[in-house]
Image: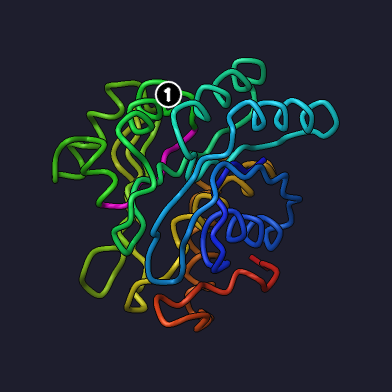
């Protein structure tokens, strides 16, 4: 089950999620949470879908189809979080992967303070892992220190935080998994260079697909990072902004 926004450029949001989970052998159950005015350069506006409509969609699909994992991206507003939390209360066994989408890579806003607070206080504690990029992690943890920010979020109820390093510099991307189970786990991935449209969506969706297929959280994260790296290596020039990772080739580990 995917709850995310619609990107009309096709580079991020629900389309990126659908492509990623399909490539990894899963069937997507997509629920659109917001409509955006967006291209490969930035997000210019976003309007949330009615939360009651989303609630009805969740209940309708769940009554008909088994759900093996849930992935969230841009959620539109705090009322949508309320609807999702009510659904999770009835289905606490389903693994949840949350990409706390706050800002687009171009700087456009995708969450107001009410939505950020709802995610922090209602949603994060229910997720297997949240996957903030560096900018989002600093905003959520109220500090520029990634480790301190992650530990503050865990102290507030997060089970684990995958701090992604795609927005940094240097020859490698370092993604770090913080959890209460032990020392942080670091993954170092060759940096291809530049910014890519929809990589955060792709990563979180790929983790959810791995969990839906029965992988452990850490194995799902490792597989997802390899999938994203390959998609970036075959990126597509869709528009005049950021290239789009090619998620269309079926994954073969």
State yes or no: residue 56 in magenta: no
> Furthest residue to the right?
64
Mark 1: give few (<14), some (14-19) or many (20+) Cα within 10 Å.
some
Residue beneath the point at 68% across and 46% down:
30
Q: Quadrant of residue 137?
A: top left
Q: Which residue is mark 1?
A: 125
Residue found 44% across the figure and 68% down from its top: 197
Which quarter of the rendering shows the N terminus? top right
Stretch in magenta:
128-134
Measured from the top left, where is residue 244 in percent x and y? 50, 73
| Residue 29 rendering spot, x and y as whole percentages | 72, 44
Direction from residue 216 to residue 30 in the image, left or right: right
Q: Name the residue rendered at 39%, 59% in the picture.
A: 44
Residue farthest along the left direction in this orientation: 144
Display colour scheme = rainbow
Q: Position of residue 43 (x, y in %)?
A: 40, 60
Q: Is residue 33 left or right of residue 198?
A: right
Viewport quadrant of the C terminus: bottom right
Vertical relation: 166 (above or below) 5: below
Rendered location of residue 180, percent (x, y): 34, 28
Q: Give the quadrant of residue 116.
A: top left
């Amino acid at each position: 089950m995917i709850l995310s926004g619609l990107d009309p450029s096709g580079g991020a949001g629900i389309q990126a999620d659908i492509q990623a989970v399909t490539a990894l052998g899963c069937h997507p159950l997509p629920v659109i949470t917001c409509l955006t005015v967006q291209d490969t350069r930035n997000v210019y506006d976003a309007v949330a879908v009615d939360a009651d409509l989303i609630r009805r969609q969740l209940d309708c699909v769940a009554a008909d189809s088994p759900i093996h994992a849930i992935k969230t991206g841009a959620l539109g507003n705090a009322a949508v979080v309320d609807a999702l939390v009510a659904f999770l209360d009835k289905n606490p066994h389903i693994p949840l992967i949350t990409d706390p989408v706050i800002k687009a890579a171009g700087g456009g806003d995708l969450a107001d303070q009410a939505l950020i607070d709802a995610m922090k206080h209602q949603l994060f504690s229910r997720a297997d892992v949240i996957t903030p990029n560096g900018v989002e992690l600093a905003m959520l943890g109220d500090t520029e220190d990634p480790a301190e920010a992650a530990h503050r979020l865990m102290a507030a109820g997060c089970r684990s935080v995958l701090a992604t390093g795609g927005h940094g510099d240097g020859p490698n991307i370092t993604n770090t998994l913080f959890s209460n189970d032990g020392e942080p786990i670091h993954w170092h991935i060759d940096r291809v260079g530049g910014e890519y449209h929809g990589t955060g969506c792709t990563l979180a969706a790929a983790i959810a697909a791995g969990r839906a297929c029965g992988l452990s959280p850490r194995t799902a994260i490792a597989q997802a990072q390899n999938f994203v790296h390959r998609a970036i290596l075959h990126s597509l020039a869709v528009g005049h902004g950021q290239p789009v990772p090619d998620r269309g080739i079926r994954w073969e580990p």
